[in-house]
Amino acid sequence: MLAFLGGTGPEGKGLAIRLALAGENVIIGSRDAQRAADAAQELSALVMGTVGSGDISGTDNLSAAEQSDTAFLTVPYEAQRPMLEQLASPLAGKVVVNVIAPMRFERGKGAIAVPVEAGSAAEESQLLLPNSAVVAAFQNVSAEELQEPQKSMEGDVVVCSDNGDAKTLVMSLAEKIPSLRPVDGGSLANSKYVEQLTPLLVNINRIYKVHSGVRIVGV
């Protein structure tokens, strides 16, 4: 079972529907269980009738974390610490996928990366979840395009972790989304470089009115 904690936003719903279409059973988590249930119902309607699709359900973040085998962190960065301080126990022994890219918006400049004392949001989450295997991935994938199941995705998913087995698992999940390619990004320390690309892509998107991504050539 894949849980999307704070999964009622664009990134959570987008990844959830893509992986459900690939046959994974997913559960949407939220601080508000009813909001999660409503999101799950919305996504279920989109995959209805698709052969081989997984089940989609919704509940509160705690219950979602308890039921999951692998959990995705899809909340804004400022919500990461308070959420994980409550969920460290149910996430122990599990793979936790951090898709968060800390950033803020400034008038006249656009999106700006937010410095993180631990180095990156992913590294901070590993400190908060010492008994989990944290993997950083999907930060540079368009949330808008993820929510359009009929649209073929383009780009690479850079996957960083200090746990080889967890990294392999997440790379296999990325491969289930058509046209996305996982790329081994090395240790979790490298996640800060991936996270900091996201504000640049957001600004490029605003200039060109597109949904840009990342492609690693020569690999």
Image (tube, grey):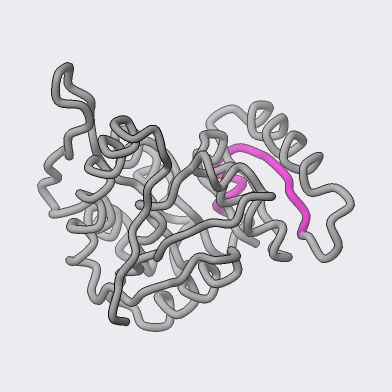
Magenta span contains residue 135: no
Asked if residue 142 is positioned above or below residue 55 in the image, the reply reads above
Q: Position of residue 182 (x, y in %)?
A: 43, 72
What's the magenta region? 54-65
Residue 215 appears left or right of 150? left
Residue 125 appears left or right of 13? left
* Res 141 visible: yes
Name the quadrant containing residue 2: bottom right
Residue extending farthest to the top is 107
Numbered-mark total: 0
Q: Position of residue 219 (x, y in %)?
A: 32, 82
- Give whichever of 154, 115 is nearer the camera: 154
Magenta span contains residue 59: yes
* Res 131 visible: no
Q: Position of residue 24 (x, y in %)?
A: 69, 63
Q: Residue at x 74, y 49 (%)?
A: 56
Asked if residue 144 is positioned above or below residue 4 in the image, the reply reads above
Q: Residue at x 13, y 54 (%)?
A: 119
Q: Position of residue 10 (x, y in %)?
A: 52, 36
- Give whichever of 174, 28 is nearer the camera: 174
Residue extending farthest to the right is 49
Name the quadrant containing residue 127: bottom left
Q: Residue at x 55, y 48 (%)?
A: 4
Query: Image quadrant for the N terminus?
Result: bottom right
Q: Residue at x 56, y 47 (%)?
A: 146
Asked if residue 160 is positioned above or below residue 163 in the image, the reply reads above
Residue 34 appears left or right of 84? right
